[in-house]
Image (cartoon, grey):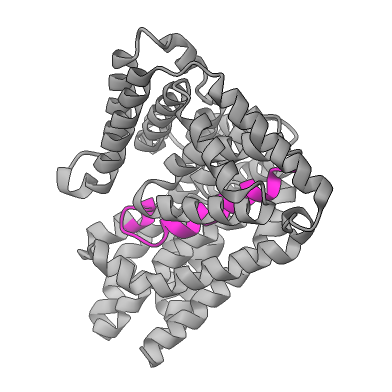
Amino acid sequence: MLTYITFGIFILAFVLIVFEVFDKSLIALSGALLMVLLNVLTPEEAIEAIEFETILLLLGMMVLVNISAKSGIFEWLNVKIAALTKGNPLAIFLLFSFVTALFSAFLDNVTTVILIVPLTIVLVKGMGKDPKPYIFGEIIFSNIGGALTLIGDPPNIIIGGATGYNFLDFLMNLWMPILGSMIFTALVFVLVYWKKLRPISDNLSELCVANVIIKKLRYKFLNTVLHKDFIITVLSILVLTLTGFVLQGVLGIPTYVIAFAAAVLLAILTTRRVKVHESFESVEWTTLFFFSGLFIMVAGVEQTGILEQLSHFVAGTTTNIFYLALIVLWVSGLASMILDNIPFVTVMIPVIMGIQTQLGPEAAVLWWALSLGACLGGNGTLIGASANVVSADLAKKSGVRISFLEYMKFSLPLTLGVLVICSAYLFLKINVL
């Protein structure tokens, strides 16, 4: 009976989020509260289910980015990008998307979208263009880029810790499907959104408007009072933060501690320039509450044992390595569209280790299937990955509303196509490479 109650709560919450009946943070918190009130989870279990590392990482980065933005450094970057692309929509899309993927490979992808999405919205809206395709691109490319390395996405960190695979192992084994996924994704975007992304070199009126906007951005920037000491301080802290993220494994300091330490240090060093309470007010509290509620609901689903049953189903299906790899890839990919991929990866690790013991070293490919499915499957829906939720909330704050169905209508077929590319890679890796 308890299992039915749990699934009833989760499915109802999911439907309400899809159709946006209420704010998603209220839905998630209500679902979490119901699971506690109906004894699916004890209050203590609910608190333990919240991944405070993720919450604190988001909180720290939101404060850090808000303080940094007040220095004018992001406006400067905006002007440089606008000048470099000459206002060409396609060039802006490709540049921002591939920069997002690159940053996400070496930083947490949530950190990347917090830095890039607001810049994109300001630039594209300033040119009179619809920023949604650009935001969609940054969401999807952040998850693709994050799948490339050991530190890019939490599932990879978990897999690396369990297997001993290092940064280079992930890079060497995943660069091919990730590159293929990026090229495929870029082509799909260009085909679907060609009217919005096409070059404007042959359109004198749009070219004129773009040049006017670029000049306006430059003029606004040149008339902004910049403080050299403030900018140097911000850049120094940002460089230290990024260095800390890259060397996190060596330092042994969790990413949320690095982010929080950077935010607090920057707030102290710039206290004469920035009012810290204004930075705290800028935090997307609804996003943090949404994640908290979602973590509790997923823990309730995990409590039923369904994820463990699913993992054993995968293990008992076949002994053919390729078929096993396909099952791991697609099950993890589809599960990650609606569930937090961290619990799924956690329960799959002992299963794959058991398979590897029985089938030998050839079964090592299952780890890469798990990584690709868990990281890339999250692109399928707006709640499939943390970067998706954060990007949508940043867009909403800037007056750009992205609905669940609007995003999924485009992202779901694209994600299925990406999983097909990964399937082809697994076939090549097992039979050819």
Q: In this view of the protein, can residue 391 be seen by the observer?
A: yes
Is 192 above or below relative to 296? below
Q: Is residue 262 left or right of residue 12?
A: left
Q: In the image as oriented, which residue stretches furthest toward the bottom?
A: 432
Q: Who's the residue at 64% across and 65% down the image? A: 414
Relative image position of residue 148 (x, y in whole percent): 39, 62
Residue depicted at 32% across the width and 53% down the height: 151
Q: Can you say whether 331 is above or below 241 in the image?
A: below
Within the image, what quadrant is residue 235 found in? Answer: top left
Q: Nearer the viewer, residue 396 or 423?
A: 396
Quarter the C terminus occupies: bottom left
Question: Nearest the camera: 397 or 222?
Answer: 222
Percent position of residue 254, x then y: 25, 39
In the image, taking residue 17 as reference, residue 79 lies left or right, namely: left
Q: Is residue 282 magenta?
A: no
Give the magenta-colored segment's residue range: 129-156
- State the count of labels: 0
Residue 366 location, quadrant: bottom left
Instruction: Give the dominant element type of the magenta stretch: helix, strand or loop.
Output: helix
Q: Is residue 162 left or right of residue 143?
A: left
Residue 1 makes an appearance in the image: no
Residue at 43% x, 9% y is: 275
- From the viewer's perspective, is residue 396 above or below residue 179? above
Q: Residue at x 42, y 75 (%)?
A: 176
Query: Where in the figure is residue 350, as x and y percent of width and height?
Result: 29, 65
